[in-house]
Amino acid sequence: MISQIEELTQTEKEFLPLLGTDHIEFYVGNAKQSAFFYEKTFGFEIVAYKGPETGNRESVSYMLQQGKIRLVLTASLNPNSEIAKHVYKHGDGVKVLALWVDDAADAYKQTTSRGAVGIMEPQTIKDENGEVKMASIKTYGETIHTFVERKNYSGVFLPGFIPRSSGAFKKSVGLKYIDHCVGNVGLGEMDNWVKFYEDVMGFKLLLTFDDHDISTEYTALMSKVVSNGNGYIKFPINEPADGLKKSQIEEYLDFYQGAGVQHIAVATDDIIATVADLRSRGVEFLYVPEVYYDDLLDRVGDIKEDIEEIKAMNILVDRDEEGYLLQIFTKPVEDRPTLFFEIIQRRGAQSFGKGNFKALFEALEREQELRGNL
């Protein structure tokens, strides 16, 4: 599928060329404690800071990095700020999916001229390390896309941030880059947001999953995946479908109080080592029963990994026409059953684990039942 998109870009010049994910910003209740959590459990390193000591009296932000992944954790110092209101309504969650571009002003112009709602007009921020240009538009729920142009900047992250270390960082767990970010939207809203990404941002529809693909005895959902031209940015978008009981999408929407980012998929080159390290640090994963592995090799064919190690780590495997992938999903990382992470290793496969959907959603339902929300 990606190759087809790449062929299209050779003949059609993209009006919104994207270089990748610049960073993901969370609004949280306590940025300091959240930063230590991601450093200690997920192997991110605290590398930059902004707060009262740097002249910012309204909020505190920590930037953490692992591979090409940047996470920004921001908390308010003002109980009446938009950050505080966001956390009060949604709990800790993703506010900004920032996209790396060559020209932030043009990205804003192109998207708003096609119907995007502007949140922040193009602005330039500077310090002794150069300048960064940024602009933002609205997407589903209260989530925004910020276009970041940093070709004239050599600082640690953004102007206003200073280098910062906790002094306690040990090592990463081998996470490399953002593979995809998944959004949950309300019933009947998925196609509207797919059209937004197609018309406003020039994305292509990559895959479609209906309630026959993603369903269990009790619940179901619909999902469509959009991708930009070079395939660096992939956004699956989910909505609930009719089922006998409340789906995990509906549970998310109830507890998050609306649409938002459901999970972030992060890539590794050695999922067995990464998951083993994460488990040793206390990261909790969804459990898939051992019966899943009884016919695994019959379903997916030969794989390079040792099946007993895969089973011991409770990792899922799926194959498409281009290869196979290995994946596993954490339990929610917030108090509310909202945001979680996916760890993924691709061995050629460009899909999203369709063959694992039933096992995954049954695992999610077991967790919902424990919470009394099924």
Image (tube, rainbow, N blue to C red):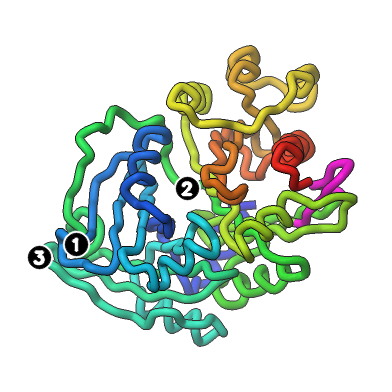
Q: Which residue is mark 1?
A: 52
Q: Amino acid at mark 3?
A: Glu
Q: Amino acid at mark 2?
A: Ile
* Of the pair 97 and 17, the residue shown nearer to us: 97
Q: Helix, strand or loop at disc 3?
A: loop
- What residue is rendered at 28% in x and 68% in y? 58
Check if residue 220 falls in the magenta segment: yes
In the image, 322: left or right of 362? Answer: left
Return the residue found at the far front: 79
Return the residue found at the far bottom: 113
Looking at the picture, how far across and down is residue 278, in whole percent? 47, 28
In this rendering, the label closer to the viewer, 1 or 3? 1
Which residues make up the magenta segment? Answer: 212-222
* Of the pair 12 and 223, the residue shown nearer to us: 223
Q: Helix, strand or loop at disc 1?
A: helix
Check if residue 207 falls in the magenta segment: no
Q: Is residue 326 above or below residue 218?
A: above
Q: Earlier in the sequence, mark 1 or mark 3?
A: 1
Tag shown at residue 128: 3
- What residue is rendered at 24% in x and 62% in y? 158
Q: Is residue 326 above or below residue 118?
A: above
Looking at the picture, how far across and down is residue 59, in whole percent? 29, 64
Main SS class of the magenta portion in the image:
loop
* Of the pair 44 and 20, the residue shown nearer to us: 44
Q: Residues within 10 Å of mark 3 (few under 14, many from 20)?
A: few
Q: Are marks 2 and 3 in contact (CB under 8 Å)?
A: no
- What residue is rendered at 66% in x and 44% in y? 352
Q: Residues within 10 Å of mark 1 (few under 14, many from 20)?
A: few
Q: Are marks 2 and 1 in contact (CB under 8 Å)?
A: no
Between the residue at mark 2 and the residue at mark 3, the CA separation in whole angstroms equals 30 Å
Looking at the picture, how far across and down is residue 47, in whole percent? 24, 46
